[in-house]
Image (cartoon, grey):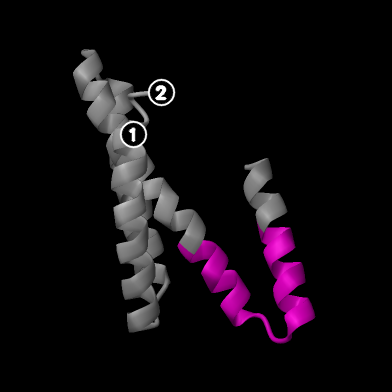
Amino acid sequence: MGTTIPFITQDNFELEQVAYFSDKCNLRGPFIIGGSIASLLGFIILITQVRSGVGYVGTIIAVTGLFPIVVVDLAWVSSVAGGDVRKGASSFIHSCLRCRA
């Protein structure tokens, strides 16, 4: 339980920053691409790591990139849809597809 506290603290802070700036700039794509690159870098570190400390840092980088992607992507899907029913249906479909991947 003690090793998850840095992940949650870091990701909560970054998630608020990414959500605020993506909404303020009205751009979602660059933030999704940036998070994808960060998580890819973290997974590359995890694959090539030898020591456990390096793996811990790679996990933090990978999770730091992944958490904002999910939230910004869901906000993007619901903001492009038209009415309330379409927003709900598109969010539901997106969540189901996200769980399958």
Q: Is residue 98 above or below residue 31?
A: above
The image position of residue 35, as x and y in percent, is 35, 54
The image position of residue 33, as x and y in percent, is 37, 60
Q: Which corner quadrant of the image does residue 19 belong to?
A: bottom left
The overriding secondary structure of the stretch rendered in magenta is helix
The image position of residue 86, as x and y in percent, is 75, 78
Residue linked to disc 1? 5
Total marks shown come to 2
Q: Nearer the viewer, residue 15 or 40?
A: 15
Q: Which residues are magenta?
A: 72-94
How far is disc 2 from disc 1 in space, using C-alphas?
7 Å
Q: Is residue 38 above or below residue 26?
A: above
Q: State the quadrant of the N terminus.
A: top left
Q: Secondary structure at mark 1?
A: helix
Residue at image position (33%, 25%) is: 3
Magenta stretch contains residue 86: yes
Residue at image position (37%, 30%) is: 4
Residue linked to disc 2? 1
Callout 2: few (<14), some (14-19), or many (20+) C-alpha neighbours within 10 Å?
few
Q: Which mark is residue 52?
A: none
Is 51 positioned to the left or the right of 16 in the image?
left
Q: State the quadrant of the C terminus.
A: top right
Q: Nearer the viewer, residue 92 or 9?
A: 9
Callout 1: few (<14), some (14-19), or many (20+) C-alpha neighbours within 10 Å?
few
